Amino acid sequence: MNNNRRFFLKAFASSSLVGTAALMGCKSASVNTLLTPTDNNDWSAAEAIKKNIKVPQFPESAFNIVDFGAQSGGTFNNSHAIKKAILTCHQQGGGKVIIPEGVFYTGPIHLLSNVNLHLEKNAVLSFSTNPDDYLPAVFTRWEGLEMMGYSPLIYAYGQQNIAITGEGVLEGNANNTTWWPWKGPHKEKHWELQYQENGQLMDQKPARKQLMVDAENALPVTERIYADGAYLRPPFIQPYRCNNVLIEGVTIKNSPFWLVNPVLCNSVTVSGVTFSSHGPNSDGCDPESCNHVHIKDCTFDTGDDCIAIKSGRNADGRRVNTPSANIVIENCHMKEGHGGVVIGSEISGGVNNVYVQDCTMDSPHLERAIRIKTNSVRGGLIAHIRIRNVEVGTVKNAIVINFFYEEGDAGQFDPTVRDIVIDNLHCNNVLDKAFYLNGFERAPIKDFTIINSHFDNVAKQSIVKNITDFNVENVTLNNQSISAKQLLAESI
């Protein structure tokens, strides 16, 4: 790390006003009291969650970026014009900032309250791949750890009533030569490694390791400076501590890192979005420590988890201590990805009240349909998960709950995973296992129920260990009825 310490002071010295304001007491998003639905009324409670989400509304005023000096063509830097249009819209009470048809090159965009960034049909926002454009550093969360880092491509901190809408494309250009190689050497490498002039590899691993040390040692976030020289790639869209967020209709392509990552937000709607990015850590939608989230009618074709619900990592997640809660996912289609609907692994703040229904998944490159990943370093309470009416074509593993993810059993914070019901899950072609459920003997998975579900063309035997109150009813594997007792016996 010694050769990289320069990024600490350089980024700190130039921390943005947004980042500074974040540390000076901007109000956080309100967190509503968790719902506690009864078993007999689960899905009406899901409807109540949706009704309690406030979708932002905007005045009719429109602010076309061309009127502020923007030029299409993909080479002129429109950062100043877009910033001016957003500020004017905000100052005049809100409305739409219009991105018209054409290709508009830009650096990072910071949204303000009551602004709807609207991309018209055939509009493309093409984002710079020059890391210097994403300085000064801002207050952000990276893999569940708070820090000062590169600005997300679209960012907002402490704002109210914001949106990104329309039929246009958000192009991150990370499939070119800048962002993805920073992942460094990796088993899934499909990018050329990059080197500094002195021959040093541009690799996120040293800074990632040091950030984890800083967080475990409770180093103040103001001193966790991980921008220039750290090679920690920014997410595409990250509203942070915002209320009433809407992302609707757009296509998001080739993100440096996670695509949509709302953090500590209240009332988030993600609707009709197409997620298309096959780079490293190309998670689709990752609500993190958010309350009241509705993800609907979206298509995911990603290089990592399609949807991953998160709540902070390790000691830092426990310090912030805010779960993700009251989340409804419906009518989505998952293609490629590490997992269809995932909880974890940055899960130390916990997850409550998640409802998934009427989704489809299908790809030989989809590794898992439903997945919970944690360990005794992450910990966290994961409770009241309801899943129904999910149709899966081809998948590697159908249902995975793993307490030994990444660090394994190396900590002192046993996770609690309980109260899960899966109803009417059908997998046509399971390339590996129907079930991989593996808790701790001292802290087993609890109260897991699966009913009316069928797994066809299953290649391998399931593994089910360390689980209590395991209920299986009307479930078949390869057209043969299976019981909880049989699944447990097969795994002895």
Image (tube, rainbow, N blue to C red):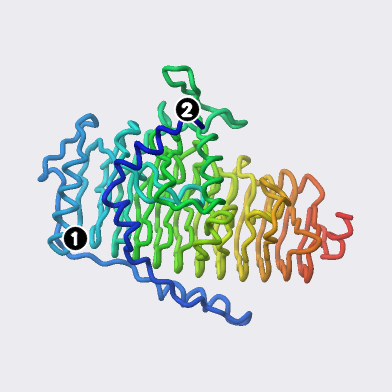
Give the residue at x 61% y 44%.
Answer: 366
Give the residue at x 30% y 58%.
Answer: 163
Location of residue 474 in the rendering, given as x and y in whole percent from the top left corner: 76, 68
Residue depth check, mark 1 versus mark 2: number of the one nearer the observer:
2
**Residue linked to disc 1:** 95
Label 1 amino acid?
Gly
The answer to whether one can see residue 399 in this image is no
Could you say which disc has been placed on residue 80 in the image?
none
Location of residue 240 in the rendering, given as x and y in whole percent from the top left corner: 38, 57
Q: Residues within 10 Å of mark 1 (few under 14, many from 20)?
A: many
Location of residue 409 in the rendering, given as x and y in whole percent from the top left corner: 73, 52
Q: Is residue 206 above or below residue 263?
A: above
Image quadrant containing the C terminus: bottom right
Could you say which disc has been placed on residue 3 in the image?
2
Residue 367, image quadrant: top right
Q: Are marks 1 and 2 in contact (CB under 8 Å)?
A: no
